[in-house]
Image (tube, rainbow, N blue to C red):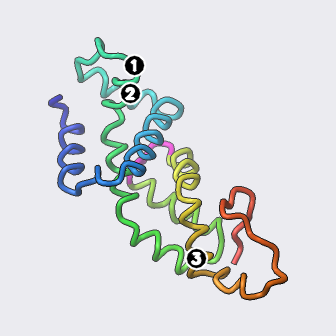
């Protein structure tokens, strides 16, 4: 593949050694493929026109076409310092989501809201773990009368 976007993405992937965490790779590729399929098919179709991969199966084509976006997300997941800083300075779930949406918009400018929702789903365990160990809930279990908080915060509004 000699498409400039794919070459740049591969260089970034190798330079930052983004393949070390398979979970991040799988999550990023899943998000990028879903984004391309549901929200930005025209942008991906333009990239398809520049490549001669029509003979490959559809799932392989999707992986190739969304590789630059997937690598951008992998780089975002690989550097956890921004998330730790964000969690340290935020006051609620919506603040976290807004900050992540802003960061996602720099990585994938087309329809960042959909990608933000998927990224939020992936990092919810990290958010929950942070608030249980460093954040507002760190002393919650010091009081035996408090009910258990679910580890997975699907339905919990994180208002600090």
Question: Compared to 28, does 131 lie above or below?
Answer: below
Farthest right residue in view: 145
Q: Quadrant of residue 95?
A: bottom right
Q: Magenta residues, as a range? A: 107-111
Q: Is residue 97 left or right of residue 9?
A: right
Q: Position of residue 145 (x, y in %)?
A: 84, 82
Q: Residues within 10 Å of mark 1 (few under 14, many from 20)?
A: few
Task: Let me know if residue 109 is in the magenta part.
Answer: yes
Q: Which residue is mark 2?
A: 62
Q: Is residue 85 left or right of residue 114?
A: left
Secondary-structure class at tag 2: helix
Earlier in the chain: of badge 3 and badge 1, it is: 1
Question: Compared to 77, does 57 lie above or below?
Answer: above
Q: Which residue is mark 3?
A: 90
Task: Let me know if residue 143 is in the magenta part.
Answer: no
Farthest top residue in view: 55
Q: Residue at x 53, y 65 (%)?
A: 126
Q: Which residue is mark 1?
A: 58
Q: Which mark, residue 71?
A: none
- How many badges with numbers are in the image? 3
Q: Nearer the viewer, mark 3 or mark 1?
A: 1
Q: Residue at x 59, y 60 (%)?
A: 124
Marks 3/1: CA distance?
Answer: 41 Å
Quadrant holding the C terminus: bottom right
Q: Is residue 127 left or right of residue 147?
A: left
Marks 2/3: CA distance?
Answer: 36 Å
Q: Residue at x 53, y 74 (%)?
A: 87
Q: Residues within 10 Å of mark 3 (few under 14, many from 20)?
A: some
Is the Cβ of the residue at disc 2 closer than 8 Å to that at disc 1? yes
Question: Does the magenta stretch mainly form a helix, a strand or a loop?
Answer: loop
């Amino acid at each position: 593949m000699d498409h400039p976007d794919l070459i740049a993405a591969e260089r970034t992937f190798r330079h930052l050694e983004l393949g070390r965490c398979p979970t991040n790779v799988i999550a990023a590729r899943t998000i990028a493929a879903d984004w391309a399929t549901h929200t930005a098919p025209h942008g991906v179709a333009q990239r398809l026109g520049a490549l001669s991969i029509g003979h490959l199966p559809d799932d392989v084509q999707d992986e190739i076409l969304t590789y630059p976006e997937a690598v951008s997300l992998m780089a975002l997941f690989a550097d956890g310092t921004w998330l730790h800083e964000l969690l340290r300075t935020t006051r609620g779930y919506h603040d976290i989501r807004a900050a992540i949406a802003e960061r996602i918009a720099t990585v994938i400018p087309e329809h960042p809201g959909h990608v933000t929702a998927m990224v939020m789903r992936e990092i919810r365990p990290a958010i929950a773990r942070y608030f249980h160990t460093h954040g507002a809930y760190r002393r919650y279990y010091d009081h035996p009368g408090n009910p258990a908080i679910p580890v997975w915060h699907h339905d919990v509004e994180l208002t600090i």
